[in-house]
């Protein structure tokens, strides 16, 4: 009888942050179980205690260099709630404009840099070439357009906050500066190219899913709940609105003020991961698994408020809004590009709105509430900042639930499904391991946000006997250029 074996992928490549996958095989060499471990402890909640609440938009955006705008905005909204103010109309529009810039740059980064190597070059391509450099070499025009699209989103952020990463802009009660019409005209010049690249991306992922429909149906496809923010008409809203949770058939289970999230969302702790497992309370754990992010939002909303993105949503639903494929994790890539189109449309609308150029951009006052909850849709999914303060405005409690946390259970399900689909009789090829990593990449996880850690580690895959003896080892270099 062949000894049982354990396969470890540590860390996962082409994601933000650090995690590992552990797969245990049975005596036949088939998958017994598989888990996605987040290996770094989080700490922002604790070391922020005692700080003045108004510092949080600056502090929390340092959680991550990919998502700083998302954390700054969610934090500012939580601070607004502590002040008890409704920020000026112009400030709200400017915040949302920066938010759209964040989505544009983040979605472009993921699709063209992190996901496209698998989609365009193939799961089993030479790992030395299966990366963004390989995409540049084989599809130079597409890669260049992707880089420029990401830059366009970053330019929106820079126009408002002075720099592309960790901008200084949103503060409790509003924003610190307005947007000049001259700068707005500069941004407007970039939309034609951005729309063109977005259309190419939508056509690319649409064709890929159509050509690989069987794989899209089987790859990490499972029934789950979905969640996201919606406006008063049930349409996609990335900055504000009510939180909606729907069942696998898209029937509404709950719709509520995000400030009341504790009545609907619980958090489970497991001993093998530092990342908590949020769940929908009415279903309990683990049945209350729900997914956030592009696919979660697309499945949760009734429509999209902008015309071109809504047209793409309807086209998407005509093809894939059915039970046998709706939960396919590869559809995240398609949904992400539909959202990208929405963000371009929304940013254009804001720049054309005369209210965007008003001078009333901030309200200042003393705290009037001892608690504030700020919720937005980050590119990767729903982001919750929850602060409690004493009478002096010093923080006594901080709770952060990031998108990657909401998706923790779903990512574990995806890893197990893909591992069981492809690993048979102990046959473990590099392309199979890449597919398992790819199941996680569908969610575009940001483990820095969920664990608040920095650094690099090489990827090592070990096959061990039941006694712990090393049978086989594959090593991936720190640059992710292949196994040796």
Image (cartoon, rainbow, N blue to C red):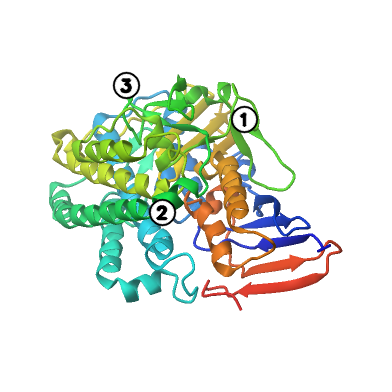
Mark 3 closeness class: few <14, some 14–19, many ≥20 residues within 10 Å: few
The residue that appears at 48% across and 30% down in the rendered structure is: 248
Q: In this rendering, which labeled residue sits more in front, label 2 or label 3?
A: 3
Q: Of 359 and 195, which appears nearest the observer?
A: 195
The image shows residue 312 at horizontal and vertical percentages of: 25, 41
* Comes first in the chain, label 1 or label 3: 3
Depicted 420 relative to depicted 116: above or below: above
- What is the number of the mark on residue 287? 1
Dividing the picture into quarters, in which one does residue 453 lie? bottom right
- What is the number of the mark on residue 166? 2
Q: How many marks?
A: 3
| Disc 3 secondary structure class | loop
Residue 397 in view (yes/no): no
Q: Of 32 and 94, which appears nearest the observer?
A: 32
The image shows residue 169 at horizontal and vertical percentages of: 34, 46
Q: Of 187 and 161, which appears nearest the observer?
A: 187
Q: Are marks 1 and 3 in contact (CB under 8 Å)?
A: no
Q: Of 235 and 27, which appears nearest the observer?
A: 27
* Comes first in the chain, label 2 or label 3: 2
Mark 2 closeness class: few <14, some 14–19, many ≥20 residues within 10 Å: many
The image shows residue 203 at horizontal and vertical percentages of: 26, 53
* Comes first in the chain, label 1 or label 2: 2
- What is the number of the mark on residue 232? 3
| Disc 2 secondary structure class | loop
Label 1 – label 2 distance at C-alpha: 38 Å
Mark 1 closeness class: few <14, some 14–19, many ≥20 residues within 10 Å: some
């Amino acid at each position: 009888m062949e000894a049982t074996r354990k396969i470890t992928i540590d860390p996962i490549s082409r994601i933000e942050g650090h995690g590992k996958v552990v797969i245990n095989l049975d005596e036949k060499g088939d998958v017994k179980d598989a888990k996605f471990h987040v290996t770094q402890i989080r700490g922002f909640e604790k070391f922020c205690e005692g700080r003045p609440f108004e510092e949080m938009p600056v502090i929390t955006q340092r959680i991550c260099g990919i998502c700083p705008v998302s954390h700054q905005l969610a934090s500012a909204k939580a601070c607004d709630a502590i002040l008890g103010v409704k920020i000026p109309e112009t400030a709200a529009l400017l915040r949302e404009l920066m938010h759209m810039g964040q989505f544009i740059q983040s979605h472009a980064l993921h699709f063209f840099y992190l996901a496209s190597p698998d989609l365009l070059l193939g799961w089993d391509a030479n790992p030395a070439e299966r990366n963004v450099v390989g995409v540049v070499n084989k599809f130079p025009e597409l890669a260049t357009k992707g880089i420029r699209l990401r830059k366009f989103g970053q330019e929106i952020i820079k126009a408002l906050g002075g720099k592309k990463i960790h901008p200084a802009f949103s503060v409790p009660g509003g924003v610190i500066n307005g947007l000049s019409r001259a700068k707005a005209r500069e941004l407007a010049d970039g939309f034609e190219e951005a729309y063109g690249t977005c259309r190419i991306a939508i056509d690319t992922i649409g064709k890929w899913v159509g050509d690989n429909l069987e794989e899209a149906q089987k790859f990490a496809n499972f029934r789950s709940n979905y969640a996201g923010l919606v406006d008063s008409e049930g349409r996609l809203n990335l900055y504000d609105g009510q939180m909606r949770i729907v069942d696998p058939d898209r029937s509404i289970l709950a719709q509520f003020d995000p400030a009341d999230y504790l009545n609907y969302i619980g958090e489970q702790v497991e001993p093998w991961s530092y990342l908590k497992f949020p769940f929908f309370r009415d279903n309990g754990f683990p049945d209350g698994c729900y997914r956030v992010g592009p696919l979660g939002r697309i499945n949760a909303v009734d429509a999209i408020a902008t015309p071109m993105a809504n047209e793409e949503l309807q086209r998407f639903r005509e093809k894939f809004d059915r039970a046998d494929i709706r939960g396919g994790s590869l559809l995240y890539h398609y949904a992400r590009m539909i959202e990208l189109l929405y963000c371009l449309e929304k940013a254009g609308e804001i720049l054309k709105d005369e209210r965007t150029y008003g001078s009333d951009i901030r309200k200042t006052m003393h705290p009037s509430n001892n608690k504030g909850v700020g919720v937005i849709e980050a590119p990767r999914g729903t982001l919750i900042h929850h602060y409690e303060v004493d009478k002096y405005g010093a923080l006594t409690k901080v709770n952060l639930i990031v998108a990657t946390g909401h998706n923790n259970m779903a990512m574990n399900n995806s890893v197990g499904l893909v591992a069981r689909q492809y690993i048979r009789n102990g046959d473990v090829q590099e392309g199979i391991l890449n597919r398992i990593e790819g199941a996680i990449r569908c969610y575009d996880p940001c483990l820095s946000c969920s664990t608040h850690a920095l650094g690099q580690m090489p990827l090592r895959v070990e096959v061990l006997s039941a006694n712990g003896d090393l049978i086989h080892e594959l090593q991936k270099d720190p640059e992710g250029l292949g196994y040796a």
